[in-house]
């Protein structure tokens, strides 16, 4: 039995408060991989420092992953297009010192995005991260706000680039989608309509695209990626996002619940029930590759989960690793209102009893590169 857990921190490379928190979590070995942004002014400097930390910590026996956190809603585009035909990813009103800024997630113009622009931008962001750490050291590909997962054409362009680079991607299957029955057992948090994650999506206008992440559509996305031999974890646990708000503060319970899916029931882990549902849906959607892959995982009892954290410190204290890098206290495309909750997520990541659960549930904490 292989119970694999990827523990990711998103948004490295934007500002000191986020980067400092991620460095703390890495030094405490509380996370296994970092998703790094390259679209902000000091992102490359920050990435160079992170890569040096990776090499230093590897000497002490801890080798974390560094992936590309593809951004088209935060920072400035690497590919601008031409004066006659600017990239569709850029906000048309971005002028002066803001020239080249992406559309933010609020009211994102999905229908106006040209897949050719997305593909070129993604390749350009790969070029930047490859220039610092090398293609062989890129652990995974994720995307800020999950924006490419809401639109079929965008996801397919994204997956095709991942395949060309032979890099794993974040699972299109989020917890609430894959674990329809199981999710009912999740803590009900604040007893209000939907989950905090879904409510945040509604607030920024993503309700228009919720149809794109219905269970059947997600399975089709997974099938497309699998046909290209792109690897991804079985499921993404994004429930941590929003569950550490002061009025809720249920992050600890959420992680325990997610990891408990590796608990055995009648000789098989509970996550097996969710995988069987995916197989059933794959048959209905005629996604043969998904049917085969998940049947093999069922046979070998080889399951994986990603836990996604958003971390920050309350202030941005001096850190040797960030020394001499200009800070960006008000970064484009990053929700400052969420920073107090990021602080609590850091506390959670540092204080959760990872070793205890590893022993109890026979877990293996891995990077994306270690997926089978």
Image (spheres, grey):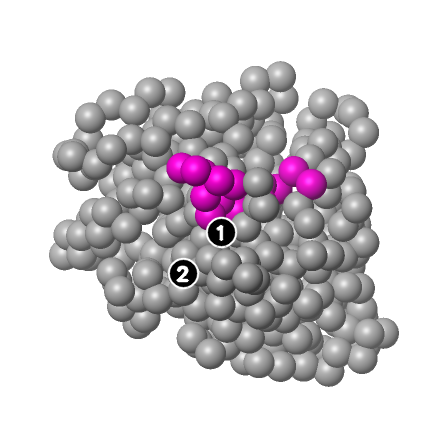
Classify 10 Å Cα crowding around label 2: few (below 14), some (14-19), many (20 and above): many
Q: Are marks 1 and 2 in contact (CB under 8 Å)?
A: yes
Q: For the view shown, which residue lies furthest in the top direction? A: 247
Q: Position of residue 38 (x, y in %)?
A: 37, 51
Q: Nearer the viewer, residue 46 or 93?
A: 93
Against 258, is 122 above or below?
A: below
Q: Which label belongs to residue 352?
A: none
Q: Is residue 98 magenta?
A: yes
Q: Nearer the viewer, residue 50 or 65?
A: 50
Residue of label 1: 71
Q: Is residue 347 magenta?
A: no
Q: Position of residue 346 (x, y in %)?
A: 41, 31
Q: For the view shown, which residue lies furthest in the front direction? A: 84
Q: Which label belongs to residue 125?
A: 2
Against 242, is 3 above or below?
A: below
| Magenta region | 94-107
User: Which residue is painted at 18% across and 56% down in the image?
Assistant: 55
Residue 45 can be seen in this image: yes
User: Which residue is painted at 61% across and 67% down in the image?
Assistant: 115
């Amino acid at each position: 039995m292989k119970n694999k857990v990827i523990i990711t921190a998103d948004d490295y490379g934007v500002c000191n408060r986020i980067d400092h928190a991620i460095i703390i979590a890495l030094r405490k070995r509380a996370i296994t991989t970092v998703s790094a942004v390259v679209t902000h002014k000091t992102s490359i400097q920050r990435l160079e420092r992170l890569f040096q930390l990776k090499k230093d910590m590897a000497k002490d026996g801890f080798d974390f992953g560094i992936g590309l956190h593809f951004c088209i809603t935060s920072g400035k585009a690497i590919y601008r297009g031409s004066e006659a035909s600017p990239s569709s990813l850029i906000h048309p009103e971005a002028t002066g010192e803001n020239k080249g800024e992406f559309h933010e997630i609020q009211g994102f113009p999905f229908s106006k995005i040209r897949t050719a622009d997305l593909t070129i931008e993604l390749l350009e962001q790969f070029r930047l991260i490859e220039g610092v750490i090398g293609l062989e050291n890129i652990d995974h590909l994720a995307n800020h706000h999950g924006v490419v997962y809401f639109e079929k054409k965008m996801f397919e362009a994204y997956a095709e680039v991942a395949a060309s680079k032979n890099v794993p991607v974040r699972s299109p299957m989020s917890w609430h989608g894959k674990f329809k029955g199981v999710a009912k057992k999740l803590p009900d948090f604040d007893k209000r309509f939907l989950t905090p994650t879904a409510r945040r999506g509604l607030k920024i206008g993503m309700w228009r695209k919720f149809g794109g992440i219905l269970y059947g559509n997600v399975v089709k996305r997974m099938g497309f990626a699998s046909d290209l031999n792109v690897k991804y974890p079985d499921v993404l646990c994004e429930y941590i996002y929003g569950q550490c708000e002061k009025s809720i503060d249920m992050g600890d319970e959420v992680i325990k619940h997610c990891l408990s899916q590796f608990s055995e029931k009648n000789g098989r882990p509970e996550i097996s029930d969710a995988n069987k549902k995916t197989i059933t849906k794959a048959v209905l959607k005629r996604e043969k590759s998904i049917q085969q892959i998940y049947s093999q995982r069922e046979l070998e009892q080889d399951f994986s989960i990603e836990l996604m954290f958003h971390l920050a410190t309350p202030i941005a204290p001096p850190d040797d690793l960030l020394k001499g890098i200009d800070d960006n206290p008000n970064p484009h495309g990053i929700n400052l209102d969420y920073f107090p909750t990021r602080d609590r997520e850091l506390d959670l990541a540092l204080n959760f009893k990872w070793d205890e659960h590893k022993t109890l549930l026979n877990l293996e904490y891995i990077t994306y590169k270690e997926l089978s």
